[in-house]
Image: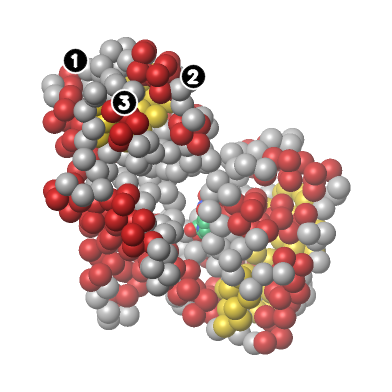
Amino acid sequence: MNICVVGTGYVGLVTGAVFADLGNDVVCVDNVEAKIAQLQAGRLPIYEPGLEEMVARTAADGRLAFTTDLAAAVRRSVIVFITVGTPPTDGGRTDLAAVEAVARGIAQAMEHYTVIVNKSTVPVGTGELVREVIERHQPKPVPFDVVSNPEFLREGSAIEDTLRPDRIVIGAPTQQVAMTLLELYAPLERPMIITDVPSAELIKYASNAFLATKISFMNEIADICELAGADVGQVVKGMGLDPRIGPAFLQAGLGYGGSCFPKDADSLIHTAATLGSDFALLRAVVEANRERVPHFLRTIEKVLTPLDDKTVAVLGLAFKPNTDDMREAKSVEVIGRLVELGARVRAYDPAAIENARGLLPKGVDYCESPYEAAADADGVVLVTEWNEFKLLNLERLRAVMRRPVVFDGRNLWEPERMRRLGFEYHSIGRKPALPA
Ligand code: NAD
């Protein structure tokens, strides 16, 4: 099938590469010339495990191409996917400018019946908006349909998630249009849900809002654990064995970040309000999430105060492991505050340092390894739970530190083990461990 994917970011590039890998002819479009030039030269603008190899393979086979020419790409395609960004604006409203711009471009280029698919996360009603924009901007009437096909991939495992999604949601105006998408996705042999466009749009927001709720719920339980001397890890284990609850997404920590959960939760609250419904529960979830980093910082401040003569190593900058994405990363808030308090910060991340430079305060030292970051530090702060940190040589880490204090924002290590290794160890929802 001839396919066009507009917007070559985390979602578009992965979607394009996977469809090409399944044997389709795919053209990926972006309006940033430098990005397209980079992709044409075989270099990836983002880090995502396995993506570079898949892009190289499918491009070499002639099934994946890159262009800034939206019109030409639309004319050769049966299906056009919109995968551009939908960033938040003030008050939780979603900025649909890029989606609308692409819809106008498609309208002006279209010469034959085309299926336009919204894969970007867009508020309920956007399918209808895209239909109106296209109708208004067509030079002459050409038939088309607008489908909602929300994306559920997770950065860091995006290829695997796209090849083996838990479900494929197709919101289509008619059964016949849905069949086009069914045919495209058939080789994946995954569960598919065919529904109407507004329901598909809401499935995405309801899913992310529910996951955010689980995270905030568990973090609030972690606070109670700290006050009561209980261990949140044990509580999660006991809860998670109940099949009605399940263990997934119940890890206490610094709260949710990234390019999706914060903006999607805010957007759903805004949508609800626009429709006349107050989503008080979700507002509380957002508020609880906002409190996570200040809560963690209060512990750091209490233990290390005064900070103006301290060196603090921060391990992990990306908003989560296996990505270089710094959007809404907790490291920005943590490091911002430490620097404000006068601490010298030495930071390390396996993939996100380049993206972090522009977002973190000047004066942060970027290091080549966790050990280099921890050298002569008065404390190590773990922000992102990269696998590499699970496998750290903790004896070596302690040996290079000036004062062996660890603040673990992700409960990556076991308190008893840290105590035995000679650390003072503070984590989330568990009693602090003091060295033996
Ligand atoms: P991104 O910022 O990484 O990529 C968006 C791309 O669109 C950029 O390359 C940008 O240059 C391009 N673009 C913007 N305007 C354009 C235009 N007019 N014409 C052509 N290209 C244009 O964003 P992303 O993370 O890939 O997210 C895209 C959408 O998918 C968002 O709605 C997001 O909420 C949703 N989503 C993201 C994820 C994720 O994990 N990143 C997961 C599921 C859904």
Find residue 368 and name its label: 2
Q: How many marks?
A: 3
- Compared with residue 102, is residue 377 higher up or lower down, i.e. above or below? above
- Residue positioned 44% across, 51% down in the render: 259
Residue at the right extreme, as displayed: 61
**Label 3 vs 2, first from the N-terminus:** 2
- Compared with residue 316, is residue 19 higher up or lower down, i.e. above or below? below
- Assess whether mark 2 and mark 1 are in contact (beta carbons under 8 angstroms): no
The mark closer to the camera, 3 or 1, is 3
Element under disc 1: helix
Side of 173 relative to 234 (left or right): right
Q: Amino acid at mark 2?
A: Glu
What percent of the width, then of the height, locates residue 124? Answer: 45, 75
Q: Quadrant of the C terminus?
A: top left
- The residue tagged 1 is 309
Q: Amino acid at mark 1?
A: Asp
The answer to whether the beta carbon of the residue marked 3 is less than 8 Å from any atom of ligand 1 is no
Q: Amino acid at mark 3?
A: Arg
The mark closer to the camera, 3 or 2, is 3
Find residue 420 and name its label: 3
Q: Residues within 10 Å of mark 1 (few under 14, many from 20)?
A: few
What percent of the width, then of the height, locates residue 195? Answer: 57, 83
Q: Residues within 10 Å of mark 3 (few under 14, many from 20)?
A: few
What percent of the width, then of the height, locates residue 306? Answer: 13, 21
**Label 3 vs 1, first from the N-terminus:** 1
Q: CA distance from mark 1 to mark 2?
A: 23 Å
Ligand 1 is found in which quarter of the picture? bottom right
- Can the viewer see residue 296 in this picture? yes
**Label 1 vs 2, first from the N-terminus:** 1
Element under disc 3: helix
